[in-house]
Image (cartoon, rainbow, N blue to C red):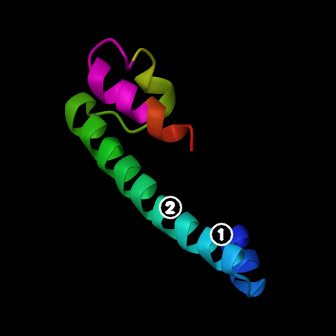
Amino acid sequence: MSFIILGIGSISDTGLNGAVLQIISHGFIDAALFFLARTSYNRLRLLYLDEMSGMAIPIPKIFTIFAIFVKK
């Protein structure tokens, strides 16, 4: 979020475009991660990450999408 403030504070076209792009990217990725967290909870019924070891075995498609979005 500090990059957004920095981009807005620069008052240049490049800075403002970068800030807007970061805001949109942040919104999409956060929405996707919240969706995937809820979906994985509904399938596994586990809350703690240490209990979810081997998540790729029971829900491989959700795990793959989750791994892609985490690489933000």
- The answer to which quarter of the image holds residue 66 is top left
Labelled pair 2, 1 in contact (Cβ < 8 Å): yes
Q: Is residue 72 above or below residue 19?
A: above
Residue located 49% across and 59% down the image: 25
Q: Secondary structure at mark 1?
A: loop
Instruction: Indicate the amino acid at tag 1.
Output: Met
Residue 45 quadrant: top left
Pointer 2 or 1: first along the chain: 1
For the N terminus, which image quadrant? bottom right
At horizontal 30% and vertical 49% (from top left) the residue drawn is 35
Numbered tag placed on residue 26 in the rendering = 2
Q: Which span of residues is magenta-colored?
A: 55-66
Q: Residue at x 38, y 39 (%)?
A: 47
Question: Which numbered disc covers residue 1?
Answer: 1
Marks 2 and 1, how far apart at CA: 9 Å
Query: Could you tell me residue 20's position as x and y percent?
Result: 54, 73
